[in-house]
Image (cartoon, coloured by chain):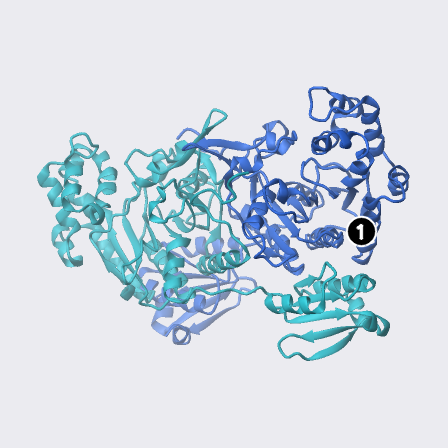
Chain colours: A blue, B cyan
Amino acid sequence: VTDLAPPRGTRDFYPDDLRLRSWLFERFRSTALAFGFEEVDAPIVEHAELYMRKAGEEIVEQLYHFQLHERHLALRPELTPSLARMVIARQGALRLPLRWFAIPQCWRYERMTRGRRREHYQWNMDVWGEPDVTAEAELIAAIFHALDQLGLAKGDVRMRLNHRALLEESLRATVLARRPEAFAPLCVIVDKLPKLGRDAVIEQLTDPAHAVQLERSEAEAVVAQLEAKGLDEAARLAGAESPALAQLRRLFDLLDAYGVADRVGFDASVVRGLAYYTGVVFEAFDAAGELRAVCGGGRYDRLLETLGGRPLPAVGFGFGDAVISELLAERGKLPQPARALDAVVFPLGEEERALAIRVARALRRRGETVELVLGALKPKRVFADANKAGARHVYMIGPDERARGVVRVKDLATEAQRDEPLATLDEVIT
Amino acid sequence: VTDLAPPRGTRDFYPDDLRLRSWLFERFRSTALAFGFEEVDAPIVEHAELYMRKAGEEIVEQLYHFQLHERHLALRPELTPSLARMVIARQGALRLPLRWFAIPQCWRYERMTRGRRREHYQWNMDVWGEPDVTAEAELIAAIFHALDQLGLAKGDVRMRLNHRALLEESLRATVLARRPEAFAPLCVIVDKLPKLGRDAVIEQLTDPAHAVQLERSEAEAVVAQLEAKGLDEAARLAGAESPALAQLRRLFDLLDAYGVADRVGFDASVVRGLAYYTGVVFEAFDAAGELRAVCGGGRYDRLLETLGGRPLPAVGFGFGDAVISELLAERGKLPQPARALDAVVFPLGEEERALAIRVARALRRRGETVELVLGALKPKRVFADANKAGARHVYMIGPDERARGVVRVKDLATEAQRDEPLATLDEVIT
């Protein structure tokens, strides 16, 4: 084997890395459970067709797909289509609303120029079957709950939100009356406004070879709306009767009850790059604005229909492990979780091995985590390793202890030593 | 999308399925931790080359591999090669012995005729850097510890073990003197003895087109050795000086100290189908012998060398989620883990929603798992859902409670009701 590195863009998890991953996942999981969500999962390999949307999304362009035995398969780039498939398969039998969460590994075949990885873990929470923005509010509250659990300060992450229907309402009488299917690719284009700039976006929106094909004046109006400063200006553009605007106002009231309204702002330029969003969209960033989005989500009330299911409103978010880890590291909040090792059991010689095994059995039966020394090691080495591993006690047994029917217990923190009778320990296992 | 099923041979995990998976994994994990092992992981996609061994193993023939952007990749069929890669990458910097465990999803492209799946989760425990059978004993003890934790009776699973070097020693002066590289493919063939029968195995061993190419008398001697009844007959064949035999006897003494010797038997026919095993090999089966192997493992002291690393002794096992689930189901030991839902919070009307949110926040801050009713539901429906979900309490707030500044708490088990002042709850969140 010539290449001993993991495939480009992927990671190995050594014990320290895995403990950190578990620390993060436990906080995702405990947050989701605190909000009454149930964990689900789906295959990491799906039919590629499940993702083949034609709106020009980056996530579809970067699909990790391949032919295998005459099937066209893909490593999932996101979980939502799998969830939609699962919901459709049992639609009618599931009690609504569904509150589902998952922490899937997702893949994208991305150019590696930006130091980005091709796999990441993405915490997902989704509500299926609730049309009201009460669901959005609950999800946004859960995100801040998790950020708090991770030890970030309240000001470290800010959320920006918008409502795609503001844009949709404004185009309904013109562009969308002619070509309603233009809305999804339009959103995918305008999502790139911060990256591409005004002119390039207008050019794409008016490109006669593209699915959107706006008039220049229409494209300019779209961009103007994305540049609206604050909810009041958006309201002027949208009109007082706008249902989207009413939903946004209601959502901010709910977020106030959750105590997180001051961490969320309206931002007319937030559109998100996924084609299927239909309503509220949101994304959270580090306050300094130096990193990519910490998480993002939105409402996707028509996804089930496009996959052949019956209509069902839905909203959800994805929260990756990469950006949050960068942010925690920057803020000095990334912990170094230690091994939880209660005891090292150390037979000084082969004559004591059977007794040492019995000691280890008894301690494990008591619920302790126990490393048994497997080779013929010197005490110096065993104590150095035990200290390095953070063990609380070393249980030592040599010829003297064997003769006296005890095991010598050393507390590594206090260095105190005591004898424990083997008979007492044996009682645990017999 | 035409196909809403997951890809053939793969599974969706709805909440009930996921809870069961978590129940199983928690027992794998707590066992490994009790034995002082540390969790690791590696990418689910690896360079296919990592698995391209030429000994005719089924696991290599069934490799789930594909070309992607000029790379030859594979979904991992097993974790061991990834672990070997990780060990080599840090060889010298890692404190030996390593005690590593993992619960990776593994893939094999298997014909679907036997109702088998193409993915499974496989609990792995491996010890790297310990040449003594103390490591084998520790691993076998961990397997029985897990089986006990899963609720199986002591007689439900039996382990059979053997030592590949018994076979290797017996061939050393003849076949292996001429062609030492024949040993791995020889083991892969004789592993199929129970399936193919004596004649077919002898035919393959003597096939001049195959890598093994024994004389007929040699092949017959190999099969005779596999048919040895018990350790004493094996000893007669191996000779009193056999190091492999001495290791086996020592291993059985150690297993006795672990209290599991009566659940393990010597079986000369156990060889295991992986090419890289060099020493002790073992596999556990349901006592009735109706299912495939519950788990299996062995010593693979030369794997690191074959991958380009420095020599390092190693031993490990894999324990899949499929057969153990079948066995637990057969024995009526498969649980139906319930949701752990502490409370449902129910605003009777929109006027009470903000207060209900504050109640949910307070309960979540207290560490409770709380489902907040998101829509305008009728009490009958809410209580039916709460009961179905196994919730302990429903916190209800209507106009009357709002006026009195309380929330009504109903205990679903006892049906007792009481009022809790909102001010008390608010103290938790302010």
Q: Is residue B51 above or below residue A423?
A: above
> Residue A427, image x and y in percent?
40, 76
Q: Badge 1, how many Cα within 10 Å: few under 14, some, many 20+?
A: many
Q: Is residue B365 above or below residue A90?
A: below
The reply to whether residue B429 is in sight is: no
Q: Which residue is mark 1?
A: A251
> Residue B352, image x and y in percent?
81, 64
The reply to whether residue A174 is in sight is: yes
Image quadrant occupied by the C terminus of chain B: bottom right
Q: Quadrant for residue A80, please give it.
A: top right
Tell me if A249 is positioned left or right of A341 in this view: right
Q: Residue placed farthest to the front in the image?
A: A178
Tell me if B127 is positioned left or right of B399 in this view: left
Nearer the observer, B341 or A347: B341
Q: Is residue A24 above or below residue A170?
A: below
> Residue A394, image x and y in percent?
47, 62
Q: Is residue A290 above or below residue A401?
A: above
Image quadrant occupied by the N terminus of chain B: top right
Badge 1 sits on which subunit? Answer: A
Q: Quadrant for residue A165, please give it.
A: top right
Nearer the observer, A227 or A303: A303
Which amino acid, by three-letter code, is at mark 1?
Leu
| Residue at (60, 29) in percent of width and height | A61
Q: Residue placed farthest to the left in the image?
A: B217
Q: Secondary structure at mark 1?
A: helix
| Residue at (56, 62) in percent of width and height | A413
